[in-house]
Image (cartoon, rainbow, N blue to C red):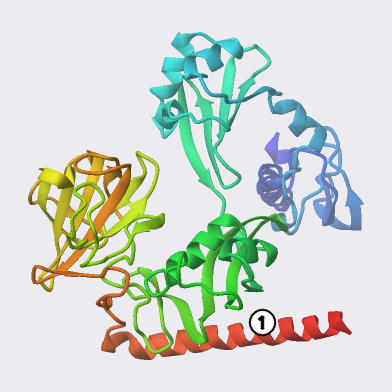
Amino acid sequence: MLKMFPKSHITIAAATTVVVTAAILMSPSADVEAKRMSYALDLEQGSASEIHSQKQKPTPAASPEQTVAVATDPMEVAPEAPSLASAVEAKPRLEWQTFKIKSGDTLSSLFKKAGFNDGIMLSVIHGEGEAGKLQRLYAGETIRFATDNEGELAAIELQRSLLESLKIQKQEESFKGETNLREPEPKPAFASGTIDGSLYLAAREAGLNDRLTMELAGIFGWDIDFVYDVRKGDQFEVVYEELYLDGEKFSTGRILSARFINRGEDNVALLYTDSNGDSDYYTPDGKSMRKAFLRTPISARVSSAFNLQRRHPVLDVVRPHEGTDYAAPPGTPIKAAGNGRVQFAGWKGGYGRAVVLKHGDNITTLYAHMSRIGKGMKSGTRVKQGETIGYVGSSGMVTGPHLHYEFRVNGSPRNSRTVKLPDAQPIPASEMAQFKKFTGQQVAQFEAFRTNYQQLAMTSED
């Protein structure tokens, strides 16, 4: 049979077979239009003629007599992407049930509301990743259950807040959980106010929420007693963060810089994060706004001031009052004024339940008349500034619930409201150049906001 064709014909046919085979292997499996350079192969004449470039769709399998199109550039051809309709049909449709978590709800009761038993619940919380975190539920959160076309549990979403959610999905025979955290976009904002009655009222009128107001008081609280030192006409200016999600404001962040003018004295605080990642507030020259001690260990009014000539209210004799009394409801938390160790914790005669802390520089502080002492407070225990060491009560020789607070240096009593408090550690010399550079930008930002605010105020008055 082969003898009927000249050797040249056989050679062309063999070469053609290789080309056609390669073309079939590299050609698309679905309808794809591509610009091609094609050839018509004539086995009888042993020749190949060019077919002009054209848009072509593949046709059903060609017979040996039909013309075969071969793409000269196989990289031009790409598999066809599935249509949107087919992709939607391929994805299983989920039905969601949403529940607002209320006080008293349990994970078991929520699963039952969604139509799932405790066995399913256990398989979820014992799943992979962070699925076990589903056990920690809080009132106000939102939980969603998704079922597939067959009515089986396919996914769970626990929305803890606008920024945090726990997502659990079924993967084959188990469930896997993952916590998703969204990062809000912070934008600087400015507020300014003048005190007429109280810092709280002036801050609210300036647009600051309660959290920012408390933060402002905390920044300057080591130098200013906001119960007794603030005067009418005092002023404050604050640059703080407004937090945005998807272009909408939803909360506020940190105070970036602040100025408080108290009795004509200018106090400026700048937020700075050091090379260790620790953030704190400093003066423009690098001194810490914090002191080694809180000015007051409790937010309450003074019911009896430091007075070495005071007449005792119970014994009716002149006896020095070597501390300051703060009237507060029973159970109010009492904070450690500074870092230190517990020197004494227990019943101390007329002081009732008391805690004595020993600090550096031969300083001790005493907290008396507690209703109960804080958990873990025993001799030798380390405490940090601001840590709760006990709760207001009326134990010992007293006429009503209050905190009696003493500040002693080398054993001698000092007025805690007026004694000069030691500063916390300043910016180290090795980091001062970076601090100056950063805070210089903060001060420039602060002044720009201040100038714009004043210009807007003048415009509105006109």
Q: Residue at x 84, y 50 (%)?
A: 45
The secondary structure type at the circle numbered 1 is: helix
Can you say which quadrant of the picture contains the C terminus? bottom right
Q: Which residue is mark 1?
A: 449
Can you say which quadrant of the picture contains the N terminus? top right
Q: Specify the amino acid type for callout 1.
A: Phe
Q: Residue at x 78, y 31 (%)?
A: 86
Q: Residue at x 85, y 84 (%)?
A: 459
Residue 342 in sight: yes
In the figure, is residue 31 to the left or right of 400? right
Against 195, is 185 above or below? above
Q: Give the crowd class for mark 1: few <14, some 14-19, many >=20 residues within 10 Å.
A: some
Residue 125: percent from the left, percent from the top?
Answer: 42, 23
In the figure, is residue 222 to the left or right of 314? right
Q: Nearer the viewer, residue 40 or 163?
A: 163
Residue 348 in sight: no
Q: Residue at x 37, y 91 (%)?
A: 433
Query: Looking at the image, which residue sits at the far front?
Result: 316
Residue 436: percent from the left, percent from the top?
Answer: 42, 90
Residue 251: percent from the left, percent from the top?
Answer: 62, 55
- Image quadrant assignment for residue 54: bottom right
- Image quadrant assignment for residue 248: bottom right
Q: Nearer the viewer, residue 258 or 267?
A: 267
Residue 403: percent from the left, percent from the top?
Answer: 29, 50
Against 428, is 103 above or below? above
Against 166, is 325 above or below? below
Against 417, is 168 above or below? above
Q: Nearer the viewer, residue 314 or 237?
A: 314
